[in-house]
Image (cartoon, grey):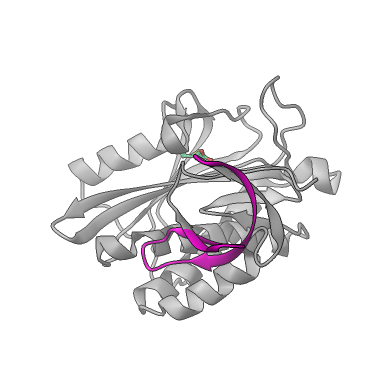
Amino acid sequence: MNYQRFESNFIHLDAVDSTNNYAANLIKTTNVANGTTILTKRQDFGKGQRGNTWYSEPEKNLILSTIIYPDIQISYAYYLNIAVALAVSRTLADFGIMNAIKWPNDIFVQDTKIAGILVENQLQGKLIKSSVAGVGLNVNQLFFPAGIRGTSMSLILGREIELNKLFMHYFGMLDFYVDILMQSNFKLLLKLYYKQLYRMDVWCNYEDVKGSFQGKIKGIDERGRLVIEREEGLSYYDLKELKFLPTI
Ligand code: BTN
């Protein structure tokens, strides 16, 4: 298979601390091709967003990190998150699972998370020299530990999914959206993102430092902040500054 931007260089591991860490080390020590992807059966110290950990039952799920040389300015970094989120979202849709992207890049089925994304960038001046796009997608996991609310493809579809087939589909999709990014077609990426954005243009409940309020997501601004319409005007939020409250 020929890809637009990626080479098919796949590294399969039995166990690792974190595929993101493994990929970051690889970048430091060797010349790895664009698209090189590390996949593992078991991850012992999976990293999540905001310093959280990512738990994934061994051998059941997709746990992977793709090395990308996006060739863009740091100020456009959030578009890389968008490209990865779109690739996961589209893969799920192609496997028959309706889903939405919860800002900035969690993948939700109805109100439950099915996949998490952690993109870590290595910078050179104002440029992103390389990126590690980590994805944890719940595939065949049927039980979640107490305190972890999650769902999986298998729970939704009622059957097992072949991990390698799913991965190959995702990889093709990631190449597709990264190609759009590398053509600097930010407008198209944003349009596709908005179509998938959870709670877009719907009045819902939120909470910020000042308390709870009703608001309507209008999109993101040029810094990647979430824009919410409120009775008194527009508000802009960075990560950690906003909590999504239940709708009822
Ligand atoms: C989140 O929702 O908090 C992001 C979770 C990202 C988890 C993936 S699993 C593969 C890759 N390696 C890591 O250590 N983390 C990411």
Q: Is residue 52 above or below residue 165?
A: above
In the current view of this chain or complex, which residue is farthest to the left? 125
Q: Is residue 83 above or below residue 64?
A: below
Question: Where are the magenta residues, as a range?
Answer: 209-235
Answer left or right for 170 relative to 92: left
- Residue 23: quarter of image: top left
Residue 172 visible, this orientation: no
Of 9 and 230, the residue lying toward us: 230
Q: Residue at x 64, y 46 (%)?
A: 163
Q: Residue at x 80, y 45 (%)?
A: 248
In the rendering, at what x and y percent does residue 238 appear?
42, 50
In the rendering, at what x and y percent does residue 243 appear?
57, 42
Q: Main secondary structure of the magenta part?
A: strand
- Residue 194: quarter of image: bottom right
Residue 124 visible, this orientation: yes
Q: Residue at x 45, y 46 (%)?
A: 239
Answer left or right for 195 relative to 73: right
Task: Say whether residue 39 is magenta.
Answer: no
Q: Is residue 162 above or below residue 3?
A: above
In the rendering, at what x and y percent does residue 90 appear?
63, 64
Q: Residue at x 53, y 52 (%)?
A: 105
